[in-house]
Amino acid sequence: MRRTLKSSRALRVLVAILLASEGSGCKSPGRNDADTTAFRDDFGSAITFDTPPKRIVSLNPATTEILFAIGAGSRLVGRTHWDSWPDSARFVPDIGDALRPNIEAVLGAHPDVVILYASNDNQGVADRLRSAGIQTVALRIDSIAQFRRATLHLGKIVGEDARARSVVDSVQLTLDAVRAATAGLPQTSVFYHTWDSPLITIGRNSFLNELVVIAGGRNVYADIAQASPVVTLEDVVKRNPDVLLVGPHTAASILASAQWQAVPAVRAKRVFVFDTNVVGRPSVTLGMAAVNIAGLLHPGAIR
């Protein structure tokens, strides 16, 4: 018997928090500007803030979303090309790419702090920004656990501890509710399409694999540790997934492709389109992403 998501209230709570927080600059109760925030970022650098920053450049869509959700959106003075959620983020000046960003453009925004994605490509960027006297925080957000950790760190940095905890708790509440709603249902085997040429999917260490599992699915490439492995269509045929999860601009081309017809799920038109507005980023929409995927894999289980 299918279970329904009795705590859909969790999703409503999360949305309400995000809407209430968007663009807000209010301080969390109990935070004193004199408090010192100290931790190590994901490059191992010691990070210390005596007062919350007033001008922030966020060079990661995930951290941009988090900052808006916890009430610090009004302090953003720079973002990347790809930061489009929430809608208010589009009003923040676009200063370029997230990986190997334009240092001059970043410095031109006169930030108190720059939030970077902690990739090898950005190690040199962090060093150059710090040499220029800019406080720089590098955070890796590739999993649900890393999302929680980054949100709490950002909450401390901007003086919004309570809001950060509320966002983390609300996302987790929704994830737990989806997991409970799909527990005991037959696992639907999934091929998750992320890129076509070369053909890229998700492996075990992708947060998207975590979402598939929470939503009652089984990623057919979960045996590969790599987060975004390149695979072949021939191997997809061999693994014979029950369904394909694809973006809205991909479904039609896959269904029309003679090569993809070799996959039984494609022939049966079990090619399901996920909502790219909420699926695809390890950020504040993680709960909504799990709801979306579960609704595709187990129609009727989520209400």
Image (cartoon, grey):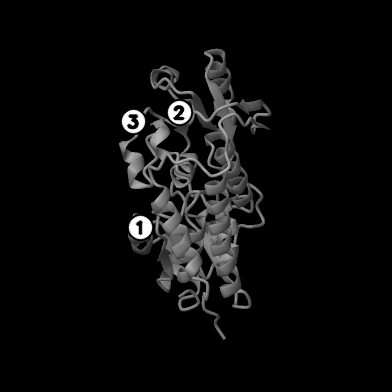
**What residue is disc 2 on?**
54
**What residue is disc 3 on?**
93
Residue drawn at x 40%, y 43% is 24
Residue 153 in view of the camera: yes
Q: Earlier in the sequence, mark 3 or mark 2?
A: 2
Query: On the rendered structure, is 1 left or right of 108?
Result: right
In front here: 285 or 198?
A: 285
1 versus 186 height, above or below: below
294 versus 158 height, above or below: below
Image quarter (top left, top right, bottom left or bottom right) of the N terminus = bottom right
Mark 3 and mark 2: Cα distance apart in space: 15 Å
Give residue 47's mark.
Answer: none
> Could you say where residue 27 lies in the image, as x and y percent from the top left?
49, 40
Asked which secondary structure carries label 3, the reply is loop
15 versus 148 height, above or below: below
**What residue is disc 1 on?**
248
